[in-house]
Image (cartoon, rainbow, N blue to C red):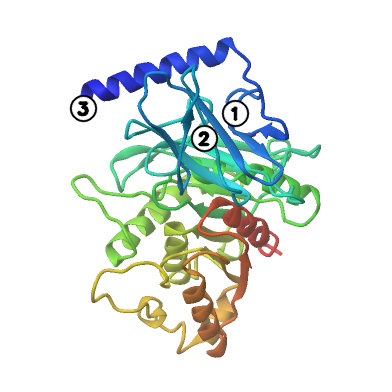
Amino acid sequence: MKRSVYRILLLLFATSLAAFSQSPNIPQGAVPAPTNIRPGDCPCIFSDLRVFFRVSAPEAGKVQVDIGKVYDMQRDEKGIWSVTTDPLDPGFHYYSLVINGVRVSDPASESFYGTGRMSSAIDIPEKGVDFYSIKDVPHGEIRNRIYYSKTTGTWRSLNIYTPPGYDKSVSERYPVLYIQHGGGEDERGWAVQGKTGLILDNLIAEGKAAPMLVVIPNGNVSRPGMTAGGYNDEAMALFREELFGNVIPFIESNYRVKPGAANRAIAGLSMGGGQAFYTGLRNTDMFANVGVFSTGLFGGISRQPGAAEFNPETVIPGILTNPASFNSKLKVFYISVGEQDPRVEATKKLVQTFKEKGLKVEFASFPGAHEWQVWRKSLHDFAQRIFK
């Protein structure tokens, strides 16, 4: 097995070198994907959103592309393999090449951390959608910072978006959105795949969002000798300790931020949506704005046999029996989900329950499944509602 993997790595290295020495033809009617390393290379996108993949692998016996659906590639006489997919949904899609049964990254594509490993990905533009495009507007900055965590006993990394003019306005203070990634991702997710900086730049320039800081921490938290995960109380307590004991103090001692719950928001996608739900609603003295995007906490995904249905009152005491208390403390409570996400019906059902009990909740759904295009739109929508 080791020899087989070694041969595949040598093959991919040779493929990468060959790609630099030639300019492959772009199929007629297609354009290179924006996520390509080289702009004149493929993967290439047709106007009907089919995608053409190509890789040089003359010694391979079988080559496939796995982009949620697995496609067999066809080999030509020169050992170049290619395939055209069915039309894909607009948005961001992780994918792998599968060479002789081994999953590897595509040397033609940029790689992103988002499936528990570095993966290739393709970003398929959506017609008429430009809220995360680079525009001629003032731009803020995504800054990577290192801080020491007393919870994990390690140095950790976070990303922070500072709005345009932050360094020039030496006395102005800003509200802060703390936003969490999903499972298999880390602090790079919202900064890179999520296009947070561009979304906020454009919204602020249009006057649709208040200038704010956006903090993107690593939500994978564990103590030495243990790993906490999922939506259980132990995992959520550990996340809360990291956020309250390390991340927020670091931000508030190093950046000019406004104090108080009204000037803090917490949001997240999938696993991070569960973290925002637990941490935000259990600590309304710290957060007056809570955004929950596409979480599996409410149901709609496979559960362990015998697992009880989600009961919000058990998780957040008083949320159904004393909604007036939450209404008085929360400025924005927001839930979103993709319209093709398996979680959609369970999410809509819970939102309806909240409303019937008198809890004020703002709901939005967007075309798409459990993927970044939905979450980009969720951030774009949520950011316009907070800090008003």
In this rendering, the count of numbered labels is 3
- The residue positioned 58% from the left and 58% from the top of the image is 259
Left or right: residue 203 versus residue 223 is right
Mark pair 3, 2: CA separation: 38 Å
Mark 1 residue type: Cys
Compared with 362, 40 (above or below) is above
Between 66 and 163, the residue placed more toward the observer is 66
Residue that sits furthest to the front in the current view: 77
Q: Earlier in the sequence, mark 3 or mark 1?
A: 3
Mark 3 residue type: Met
Mark pair 2, 1: CA separation: 31 Å
Between 271 and 3, the residue placed more toward the observer is 3
- What secondary structure is marked by label 1? loop
Left or right: residue 58 versus residue 221 is right
Q: Nearer the viewer, mark 3 or mark 2?
A: 3
Kindly identify which residue carries mark 2: 144
Quarter placement of the N terminus:
top left
Picture coordinates of residue 38 (x, y %)?
Answer: 61, 22
Q: Earlier in the sequence, mark 3 or mark 2?
A: 3
- The residue positioned 42% from the left and 61% from the top of the image is 275
Confirm or deny contact between disc 3 and disc 1 (CB under 8 A).
no
Q: Quadrant of residue 61?
A: top left
Kindly identify which residue carries mark 1: 42
Q: Is residue 331 at all visible to an observer of this figure?
A: no
- What secondary structure is marked by label 3? loop
Question: In the rendering, which numbered label is found on residue 1?
Answer: 3
Q: Is residue 342 at all visible to an observer of this figure?
A: yes
Picture coordinates of residue 12 (x, y %)?
Answer: 41, 20
- The residue positioned 35% from the left and 21% from the top of the image is 9
Mark 2 residue type: Asn
Q: Nearer the viewer, mark 2 or mark 1?
A: 1
